[in-house]
Amino acid sequence: MAYTFEEIKKLEQKAAEAAQKLEEARNEFKSVSVVKVKEEIKLFGLSPLELFTRQEIESALERAPKKQSPEKTKDDDAKPRVNVVIFRDPASGTEWNGKGPMIPKWLVALKQEGKLYKDFLVEGTKWNGKPEKAPHWVKALQEEGVSLS
């Protein structure tokens, strides 16, 4: 029996529709079966080891699709760096963020001129860390009577 091109296309379409119906029926049957099996397991208080061997469980876990976390980039884990200015010299505009082991020379020079650190503290500066781990500039401000909390 020879088929025309149009007849072959119609048969292919019918086969695709039948395959789709079969898949839908299979999925529906599977869903109903899972519900029934869960009810039976709950009813009899069965554990996985009563139903399967350890090897079957391990094998199923190996075949199970891995949960994939969304793609992370190196930048996602990093906290955004914010350079918060803590001290500013209003005359020169020089700034310091309070980081580093030493107070900058410009601030030391101003201190030696008899000025106080609190005079150069940026308004709204807070420090809410542990008192025993306070950086040197916090201790210096505390000596001047400034509370940063």
Image (tube, rainbow, N blue to C red):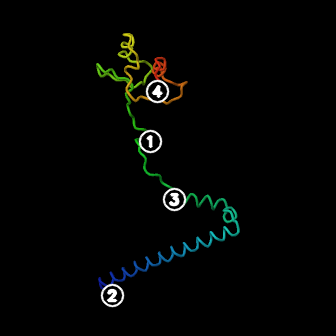
Amino acid type of disc 4? Leu
Give the mark toward the camera: 2 or 3: 3
Q: Which circle marks residue 148 in the picture?
A: 4
Callout 1 crowding tier (Cα within 10 Å): few <14, some 14–19, many ≥20: few
Q: Residue at x 37, y 26 (%)?
A: 122
Give the mark toward the camera: 1 or 4: 4
> Which tag, 1 or 4, sits closer to the chain's start?
1
Distance from disc 1 to disc 2, alpha carbons, whole Å, reads 65 Å
Q: Residue at x 60, y 60 (%)?
A: 59
Please say if 79 is above or below 32. Answer: above
**Residue 103 percent coordinates (x, y):** 41, 18
Q: Secondary structure at mark 3?
A: loop
Amino acid type of disc 3? Pro
Q: Secondary structure at mark 4?
A: loop
Callout 2 crowding tier (Cα within 10 Å): few <14, some 14–19, many ≥20: few
Callout 4 crowding tier (Cα within 10 Å): few <14, some 14–19, many ≥20: few
* Residue extending farthest top: 113
Q: Residue at x 64, y 59 (%)?
A: 55
Quadrant housing residue 47: bottom right
Quadrant of image for the N terminus:
bottom left
Please say if 47 is above or below 106. Answer: below
> Which tag, 4 or 2, sits closer to the chain's start?
2
For disc 3, the marked residue is 65
Residue 52 left/right relative to 24: right
For disc 2, the marked residue is 2
Q: Residue at x 30, y 85 (%)?
A: 4
Distance from disc 4 to disc 2, alpha carbons, whole Å, reads 92 Å
Q: Which circle marks residue 77 in the picture?
A: 1
Callout 3 crowding tier (Cα within 10 Å): few <14, some 14–19, many ≥20: few
**Residue 133 percent coordinates (x, y):** 53, 25
Distance from disc 4 to disc 3, alpha carbons, whole Å, reads 52 Å
Please say if 114 is above or below 1. Answer: above
